[in-house]
Image (cartoon, rainbow, N blue to C red):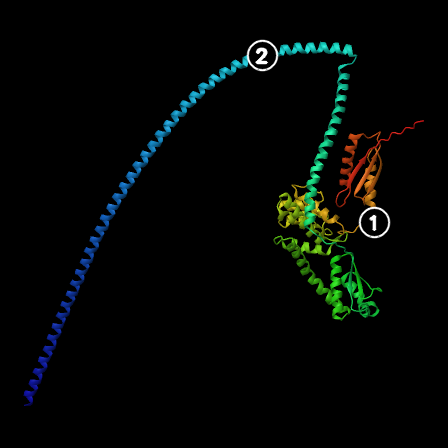
Amino acid sequence: MDLKSQILADSAALVGAGAGVFTALVGGFYLRFKKRQEKSARESEARSVLDLAKREAESVLREARLSANENALRVREETEKSFADRRTELANQQKALTDREATISHQFDGLVREEQKLREKSLEWQKKFEHLEAERREVEAMVQKRRQELEQVAQLSIDEARAAVLKTADEEASREAASLSHRILEDAKANAEEKARKVISVAIQRYAGEHTFESTTSTVSLNGDDIKGRIIGREGRNIRAFEAATGVTVLIDDTPNAVVLSGFDPVRREIARESMERLVLDGRIHPTRIEEVVAKVSAEMEETILKAGEGAVMRTGLPPMHPEIVKLLGRLRFRHSYSQNILDHSVEVAHLTGIMAAELGIDCQLAKRAGLLHDIGKAVNHEVEGSHAIIGGDLVKRYGECDVVVNGVASHHEEVPPVGPMGILVSAADAISAARPGARSETMTTYLKRVEDLENIALSFDGVDKAYAVQAGRELRVLVKPDEVDDEQANALVRSISRQIESDLQYPGQIRVIVVREIRSIEYAK
C-alpha cells in the first residue's frame, strides 16, 4: 500500500512537472508571437508615416516648382517691361539730343552772322573814331588859339584865371552849402524833436516814479533812551564789538529815541541796521550776542539779495533770468547813485524803455530786459576794472543774453557804438529817470563845476566873445564877435559847441545851446 502510494505520488509529480514545462513552452511561444505582431505593426506604421512624408514632400516640391515657375515668369515680364521702358527712354533721349544738336547748329549759324555784323560795325566805328579824333585835334587847336587871344586881351594867365574862378565858385558853394545844411538841419530837428517829444512824453505820462532820497546813514528807532546805555556797554565794549563786527560807525547823540548807523558800504550798513533792530528787540546786548546776531544776519543777506532781484524781475513783468543775473540785480538794492537807489532806477528805466519801444514798434520784452540790466555793472564795478556799461555788457553776454540786449547795456553811455535803436532807447530812458525832479540830489559843488565847464567849452572856440550858462545849466548862451563870425559860421559854431559838450561832459537830460550874433549901428545927429 505504501509502494502504491509512492508510485502514485511520483506519477503525479511527473505529470505536474510535464504540465509546467508545457505551460512554459506555450507561454514562450505566445510571447514570441506577440512580439512578432508588435514588430509587424510598428513596421507597418513606419511604412505608413514614410509614405505620408513622401507624398507631402512631393506635394511641397510640386508647389515650389509651380511658385518658382510663376516667379520666373513674373521676373521675365518685369525685365522685358523694364527693357522696353529703357528702350523708349533711350529713344526719347536720342530724339532730344538730335533736336538739341539742330538747335545748337542753328544758334551757331546765328552767332557767326552776328559776329560778321559786329566786325562790320567795328570797322565802321573805327572810321568814325578816327574822324572824331581829327575833329578833336582841330577843336583843341582852335581852343588853344582862342585861349592865347583871351590871355592877350585879359592880361591874365590861364592858371590865374582858373584860380579866380575857383575861388568865386568855392565861396558861392560854401554859402549855398551852409544855407542848405542849416535848412536841412532845422527841418530834421523840427521833425525829430516832435517825434521824440511825443514818444518821451507818452513814456513819462504812462510811468509814475517815486521821489527817492537816500544817504550814507541809517536810523534805528528805539523805544526809549535808556537802551542807548546798553548799546554802548560798560566802558564802550558793546559799541566797539558792534562796529568791529559790522564795519560801520554807530553814532549816539542827543537825538531822542534813535541811533544813527553811518557807513559807505550799503550792504554792510543794511546788515548793521537789521542786527541793531534785532538786538534792541531781544534786549540781550553783549559782545558774544552781537557776534551771533551779525553772523546770522550776514548769512541771511544772500537770500535777501536774491529776493530783491527776483522782485525786480517780477515788477517788470519779465520771464525768469539767470540766477547770477538775479543776484547781481539784488545787490543793486543796496547801491545808490546821487542818492537814487539803483535797483529802483533800473526798474524805472525798464518800464520807460518798454513804453518807448512799444510806441516805435520795437520788441517790448527785449527793451525791458536791456533797461533793467543797463546798470548791472555797478554791482561789481569795484571788483572789475572798466566802466559799468562795458562791464555790464560783458556780464549779461556771459550769462546768455542776446546780442541786442548786450549792445543796449554796453552802449547806453555811448562808450560802445549802438547797433540799432536799443542802445539809444536805454540811454534816453536812463536820462529821463535820472533827470526827473526829485530823482537825484546834486551837490552845489557839482552844479557849479558843470556850469563852469559849459562856459569854458564855449569860450575855447574862436570868435566867441562871452558865454553864459543859465537855467540851472540847462541852457548855454554864446555871444560871438559879429566882425569875425558871419551867419553861416554861427550855424556851424553852434553845432561844434554842442558836439564838444556831448563829448566832454556827463549830464542828465539835454542842454540847449544858443549862439547870438548881433550888430548894432549907432550914429548921432548933430
Q: Mark 1 points at which residue?
A: 444
Of the pair 78 and 267, the residue shown nearer to us: 267
Q: Residues within 10 Å of mark 1 (few under 14, many from 20)?
A: few
Asked whether the viewer can see residue 373, the reply is no
Element marked by disc 2: helix
Above-or-below relation of 83 to 392: above
What element does badge 1 sit on? helix
Q: Foreground residue, 50 or 74?
A: 74
In screen coordinates, is 521 left or right of 400? right
- Seen from this angle, which residue lies furthest front? 526
On the image, the x and y values in percent for residue 478 come to 82, 37
Q: Which mark is residue 429?
A: none
Which residue lies at the image location 78% right of the left edge and 51% below the top edge?
Answer: 441
Q: Position of residue 72 (x, y in %)?
A: 27, 42
Q: In which quarter of the image is residue 359?
A: top right
The answer to the question of whether label 1 and label 2 lie on touching residues, with beta carbons closer than 8 A, is no
x%, y% of residue 37? Answer: 15, 65
Q: Which amino acid does label 1 sit on?
A: Met
Q: How many labels does the image show?
A: 2
Q: Residue at the location (47% across, 16% down)? A: 113
In which quadrant is the C terminus drawn?
A: top right
In the picture shown, does residue 45 fall above or below 516?
Answer: below
Q: On the image, which quarter does residue 423 sit in?
A: top right
Residue 467 place in picture, x, y as percent: 84, 38
Of tags 1 and 2, the one toward the viewer is: 1
Using the rendered image of the protein, determine whether residue 89 is visible from the camera's viewpoint.
Answer: yes
Residue highlighted by disc 2: 128
Q: In this picture, is 318 found above or below 114?
A: below
Alpha carbon separation for disc pair 1 and 2 = 84 Å
Local crowd size for mark 2, using a 10 Å CA cut-off: few (<14), some (14–19), many (≥20): few
